[in-house]
Amino acid sequence: MSLGAPRLIVARDNPLVQTLRRLAEGSGTGRAAREQGQVWLEGDHLCRAAQARGRVAQMAVFSESAWASGRWSALAGDAAQTVLLADKLFAHISHLPSPAGVGWLLTMPPAPVLEVRAATVVLDRVQDAGNVGSILRSAAAFGIRQVIALKGTASLWSPKVLRAGMGAHFGLALFDAAEPSLLDSLELPLLAASSHAEHALSVARLPWPAAWVFGHEGQGVTREIQARCLLTLRIPQPGGEESLNVAAAAAVCLYESVRR
């Protein structure tokens, strides 16, 4: 359990409250997380997902009423500190419509070592945080080992991506704001998804393991990255839509690769 009794904070100008509010702001840039080297997880689902993967909170934070209920006290776990915020103060830092009353402050994990032959997802300027988080969920579900987010992609550690990822972050090696040159170290073929490709995913011979590349919601994969790809494939859409949402397309492509 955390050391000592929880301390109660009631002042809005407390430095910790200001730090938590900046981290919780929800910007897709993840700037506050990078600058402070810390990540804010709000809600019992995210905290439990991190705990299940062996992560230890730098600080467990509860609203007074959440702590008094006893429902989530186990999430204090081995945290170095446990802090209680007055309910109105927790609502002040939260950017959720209904504040969860529980959160973890984590130290930003160190940059992982690239596995050059591991199945990989590459995100090329995917800008919507919800799409990025959803792709992380699909990657984790289908056994992908690592995700490389190239510069211009929504930060993998921004609050909105964390919420959309639903805990997938803690089962993946994540490379945030990476340079395209990192792809040169991969020793496996790159595959790109595009609604304008000549070859259909349903009939193509898919290499495995591979690195799937998913691009910007409107512009797709850049020519620079596409030139590195062995295949560019489209998903057949007999219903006649022009294209799928990038997160939906990623789920289809990853499932099809694993299925085969």
Image (cartoon, rainbow, N blue to C red):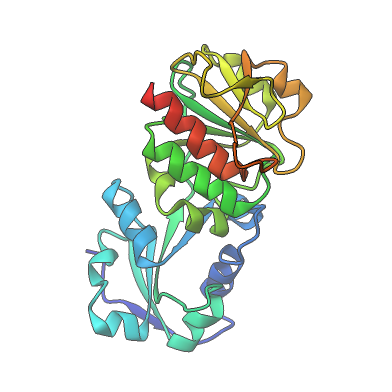
212 versus 45 height, above or below: above
- Depth check: 120 or 212 in front? 212
Residue at point 68%, 32% (across, down): 195
- Depth check: 184 or 105 in front? 184
Q: Quadrant of residue 125?
A: top right
Residue 10 visible here:
no
Q: Quadrant of the N terminus?
A: bottom left
Residue 201, given in percent of the width and then of the height, sits at 55, 24
Q: Quadrant of the C terminus?
A: top left
Residue 142, given in percent of the width and then of the height, sits at 38, 34
Q: Quadrant of residue 194?
A: top right
* In this picture, residue 101 sits left or right of residue 206: left
50 versus 184 height, above or below: below
Residue 119 visible here:
yes
Residue 90, given in percent of the width and then of the height, sits at 47, 80
Residue at point 69%, 37% (across, down): 151
Residue 61, given in percent of the width and then of the height, sits at 39, 71
Residue at point 24%, 75% (across, down): 71
* In this picture, residue 6 sits left or right of residue 153: left
73 versus 226 height, above or below: below
Q: How many marks?
A: 0
